[in-house]
Amino acid sequence: MKRSTLWTGVALIIVLVTGLQVSVVDVTAQDDKYARQRECRRLLKDALALMQGGQYPEALEIIDSVLAVDPGHADGYYYRGLTRLHSGDSAGARQALTEGTKVAPMSSRIKLLLARLQLAVGDAAAAEALVDAVLMIKPREGEALYLRGLIEMDRGDTTAAVETFGQALEYGLAKRGN
Amino acid sequence: MTKGLFRSKRGLIIVGLVVTLLAPLVAGAFKYLREGMAAPKIIGTDLLSGERVATEAWLAENMVVVVFWATWSPRSLDELRDLKKTVAEFPDLPFRILAVNADGQTLSAPERDAIVGLVTELDLPFPVIIDEGLEILYQYGVMAMPSTAIIDSTGTLRFGPSGYSYATHDLIVDSIMTLLGLAEPREGLVIDAGYRPNKKAGRYCNMALQQFLRRQYEQAIKNLDMARAADSGFAQPYTLRGEIYLELDSLDLAIEAFGQAVGLDSGSVPARTGLGIAFLRSGQLGSARAGLNGALTIDSEYTPAVLNLGLCLAELGDTVAAFELVEKARDLNERDPQILYVLGQLHMNSGGISQAALAYRSALEIVFPAP
């Protein structure tokens, strides 16, 4: 065999083996990522059950552990906000959800829950900004339209509110039927 | 003057929604069950004792009374209290009662606590389970709160009154006594009515119902064809077929199917109501009115019939009667957002913007409850 052919063969083998190792590492890394996501989902499910059972500190502990592992986990912020809300810590809930809107700007449920809390403390302007942000991406989001209708009613614009409520019901009832 | 609900896109959407979504979320007899059919088995966990409850285990030696109830339904609580007295009055009779709470699709911890608190306070001598996700409610097609299913020891539904009053309680007790052979049926009490389909037809129909609830309409229709082939006298496959065609907006086919159901079972309130709704949606108001009135003659509190007759009368310009009926529907089920939506629409069309806003808001509080 010619030497050049031999060296070409060796080089090819090295490239192949390296490539294989890289793809194995990629697959392994991906597997780890999916496993972590699954584990986070499982933990949050446990946290939700604890929250529904009124065990708020225990639920928060689990949620904190999820966010320590995955600081970008949108559901983590949502459930942190929800659990604090149910435990009576409305300010803490708003703080968690506000943080969540920055970390997970595409999460409409974080925005909508925060909007409800903003409405509850009388900050209609902040609520409206959140609702409008959701409607810009999801114009048929029934809950967002409902909250918009509430804002319009608070403002005294009953005619607009009725129109908005009507739309919210059309979309909300249709989704509910599904 | 009432704006024509069907001459506007919004009006058509309303009616479509009312028809397609007024399915199992309360009011009327059992939409998918007729006397003579096998009642779906129920399994659950007793709220207070934590013990497993299964109606199938009771049937060997007892007849079973299933009560669907909710904390927000005052008549439900009346029925539970009266049944408590009935159990005390007849402690040795072979019947068992199961109370199925259907407060909502999802329940928060405080809501569950409230149910437990109420059940503890009522001190009932029979188990109470929570219908998680309202699955049992959908299986039975419960149309009113409360609704009662009286099931004999073969697992067959024998009597299913909807709503509750003292008269209903008497009927329930009388039916239990009659079915146990301890009394002759009193005048007006028909508890042995109902076509009993053969088992094969019943099974196909039940499979079709599951598929219908999952919106698998094509498969459902195939199974309904099999049910019809197995038992040509069984009306329920036609009724369910009609429901599917309503969902698909195939109104002529819906009219045909419901018509066939009524032809086989003239006492079927769901079939008569479905026929009325199909006529209503196709703009045949006179036929709709006649059909819905026919249903209400048999069961004056079947909410889909009450509500749709209200819509029909609104369309015919009789706003006063329309409001009366829709308000009646709301009294029968104050937690049905579709009824509140229709009420809002009636107010809108009558110029009552504030009342419309209130009705819509009430509906939306149910559709989008605070998390």
Image: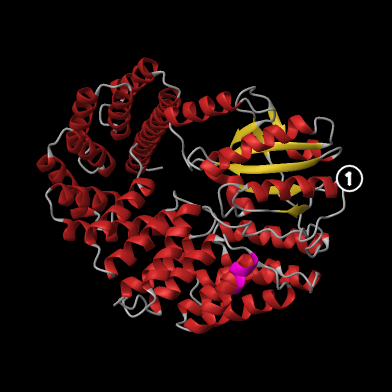
The quarter in which the N terminus of chain B is drawn is bottom left
Q: Is residue B264 left or right of residue B137?
A: right
Residue at numbered disc 1: B182
Please, which colouring scheme is shown? secondary structure
Q: Is residue B244 left or right of residue B310?
A: right
The quarter in which the C terminus of chain B is drawn is top left
Residue extending furthest right? B181
What is the crowding at mark 1: few (fewer than 14 residues within 10 Å), some, or many (at least 20)? few
Identify which residue is drawn at 33% across, 80% down: B7
Q: Is residue B151 left or right of residue A63?
A: right
Identified by mark 1, the residue type is Leu
> Is there any visible trace of residue B324 in the rendered image?
yes
Q: Position of residue B252 (x, y in %)?
A: 55, 83
Q: Position of residue B322 (x, y in %)?
A: 41, 69
Q: Is residue A90 left or right of residue B111?
A: left
Q: Based on the picture, tell me whether residue B12 belongs to the magenta stretch.
A: no
Identify which residue is drawn at 75% across, 29% down: B88
Count how many numbered circles sit on residues in the image: 1
Q: Position of residue B222 (x, y in %)?
A: 67, 69
B44 versus B139 height, above or below? above
A13 versus B152 height, above or below? above
B265 versus B32 height, above or below? below
Q: Nearer the viewer, residue B310 or B23?
A: B310
Start-end of magenta stretch: B294-298
Q: Nearer the viewer, residue B198 or B328?
A: B328
Quarter of the image for residue A65 reads: top left
> Is there any visible trace of residue B131 in the rendered image?
no
Quarter of the image for residue B180 reads: top right
Tag 1 secondary structure: loop
Query: Which chain is disc 1 placed on?
Result: B
Q: Position of residue B54 (x, y in %)?
A: 73, 36
State the predominant SS element of the stretch in magenta.
Answer: helix
